[in-house]
Amino acid sequence: MSQRPVLTAEERKLPYAKYYDLPITPIPAEKIAVLEAGPIDPSLALKIEDRNKLFEPGYLPCEIGYCVMEDGSAYLANRTEMPGVTPEMFEWWFAWHGLEDMRYRIWDPEDHFYARQQMREKVLDPKVPMREKTWGTVHIVREDIGAGPDDLILEFRYPHELGYDESKVGTKDCAAMMCANGHGPVPGQGVAAVMTHMVREIEGGIELRSRFWIGWGLVNGQVVKLVPDGVRVPVEVPMGLFAHNLKEFGHLATILPDLYKEVSVMSQRNVVVLFR
């Protein structure tokens, strides 16, 4: 965990700067217990080739946990209930937060430093549907996921590009989905991962089902294992990312309903103002 940097005078003037000062939402005790219990049995993990099982009704054998798989790659899963959040709010958040450093920092003021959208024109185009404002774009981010501040590149993809049945997105099976091919700034160095955030509506809000397959990535249009045979991802990697995921999405669940309401009112239904 990093100390929160002091805001500049200009940052302090931003209408949502007050969210930066909020205490981090405590991680529920039952999730802390999962973290402290250590890795799950790899047989309970969702194999990446079975990722479309996320669209099936009900829940998979492991919705919260992490492990190193038998093939040396790693895995983590988390389920976050978000009362008062709608699928539209979730899609808006992913489009909105990459346009200014402070927007990413209020998500987790202790561990997030910046997220910079590389395709601002697409996000700002009022003709692009909300969920597609993120699909097909790239975020350059700096965050601390357990080993100190690190630079990452998140290539958000259309779901079909990462092997998902995209026709399911926007249905009762999957109200929203954000998925990405993540890696370090230098190709071939560091740990890559395929990331998925899948939303289902529940009574009073949404549930977010997150999955990370660490040591996998998109190469020439195909999802492939990047960890060489005989090499294993250190267990500290999925453990650190799991702890970070518990923290950041628990806090987002707290701030998003009010933030969305306030910024939407400010926008007066003008998407250009909303995203500028």
Image (cartoon, grey):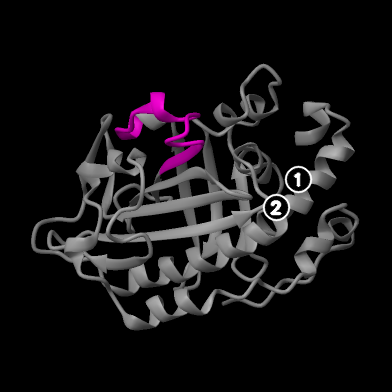
Tell me if 83 is positioned left or right of 183 in this view: right
Callout 1: SS: helix
Whether residue 156 is in magenta: the answer is: no
Q: Which mark is residue 256?
A: 2
**Residue matched to label 1:** 260
Q: CA distance from mark 2 to mark 1?
A: 6 Å
Which secondary structure lies at badge 2?
helix
Confirm or deny contact between disc 2 and disc 1 (CB under 8 A). Answer: yes
Spot the residue most to the left: 230
| Residue 110 picture location, percent across and down | 64, 71
Residue 237 image-quadrant placement:
bottom left
Quarter of the image where the C terminus is located: top right
Which residues make up the magenta segment? 161-180
Residue density around tag 2, few if under 14, some if 14–19, many if 20 or more, within 10 Å: many
**In this view of the protein, which residue sits in the foreground, 222 or 250?**
250
Q: Please name whichever residue, 170 or 121, is drawn nearer the observer in this view of the structure.
A: 170
Where 252 sits versus 128, above or below?
A: below
* Residue found 61% across the figure and 49% down from its top: 205
Q: Quadrant of residue 10?
A: bottom right
